[in-house]
Image (tube, rainbow, N blue to C red):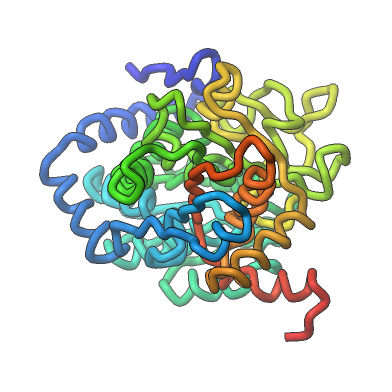
Amino acid sequence: MITDGKFGKYGGIFVPELLIPALEELEKAFLKYKDDDEFNQELDYYLKEFAGRPTALYYARNLSEKLGCKIYLKREDMLHTGAHKINNTLGQGLLAKYMGKTRIIAETGAGQHGIATAVVGSLLGIPVDVYMGLEDVERQKLNVFRMELSGARVLPVKTGSQTLKDAINDAFRDWVGSVENTHYLIGSTMGPHPYPTMVKHFQTIIGREAREEILQKEGKLPDAVIACVGGGSNSMGIFSGFMDDKEVELIGVEGGGYGVETDRTGATLCKGTEGILHGSFSFVLQNDDGQINEAHSVSAGLDYPGVGPEHAYLQTIGRARYVAINNEEALRGFELLSRYEGIIPALESSHAIAYAEKYAKMPENKGKTIVVNLSGRGDKDMFLVAREMGVEV
């Protein structure tokens, strides 16, 4: 019997009855193979030889000198496909293979999860269909082309806000009718159990490496770990390495859109209320009648009106705190890291960089050691950023 997958009161399973057998099958397979030697040897091989792990923990000397703190960057942007997403897609892709599934479906916002799923499908010889909101298809044309080059079929979603929320809706509808041969490869720590636990499991490699690396470089733990939060997989991955170290502050940075004081925001934990979205109980952006509001962020990967249930739990118990960075601040973070370190971050990661600057400038934080999870690189965002900055390219 499937367990409830709760984090305190958050999480759980709120799906059509038709999907319960598929979730039971998935949980059973995950619990079996996560500790299986053959599975883990194959996964470790691909993580190292295909994806490029371990990733470096880079001391950002120039940025550190400018801001008056020691700033380290966990370089997930250096992975194959350009983001942390490959950690999870390799894990779930292999799981689908071991389960005998012959098709994979996925949702994507910024396109990084879609690309990571497409290349894993190509690697393992499993056909891939990717649902993507039409607005995101337009924003991320380069990533659409990369997915298609890797053999995936990109299915534009033309309903609702035409962004990540609607792509997830269509992927769930597909899965209901195809569970026998299809694995739905969810890209973040959201959705019904076992997805939040499973995706976190495959992303904990970020936290394990970061903890070991900072101890080697500094001989002590950092004062703070900062990561962007959409659904929450990169942040949960790095937070996991420091969860039991109460002296380490964990800070999640949401996309605030045009500001949390407006309705055009994606800052779910900062502005949302408790509710159910995509199969789990967490915080969501909704109106007084419980209808889901559209989220907005300059970053397609943070354009989601919900958040993973474990993040809701961590906020409630006070183990992590969550802040919002608006579009203008995120663009400054993008430019800041590019100019001072020669590293062009994804717009998602730019939110974390922008808050690291704010954090470092607080008098009480002078001289502290900060680890920022650089979850992805900015190739995919260049045309969008140029447009926002009024630059012709």
Q: Residue furthest right?
A: 262
On-image quarter of the C terminus: bottom right
Q: Nearer the viewer, residue 254 or 282?
A: 254
Q: Does residue 45 appear in this view?
A: yes
Q: Residue furthest left?
A: 37
Q: Does residue 309 appear in this view?
A: no
298 displayed left or right of 62: right
In the image, what residue occupies the spot 65% across and 74% down?
Answer: 382
Q: Residue furthest bottom?
A: 393
Q: Nearer the viewer, residue 232 or 337?
A: 337
Residue 192 locus on image (x, y percent):
49, 29
Residue 75 locus on image (x, y percent):
43, 59
In the image, what residue occupies the spot 37% across and 17% down?
Answer: 3
Q: Nearer the viewer, residue 340 or 344?
A: 340
Residue 31 locus on image (x, y percent):
25, 30
On-image quarter of the N terminus: top left
Quadrant for residue 179, please give it.
top left
Residue 240 locus on image (x, y percent):
40, 34
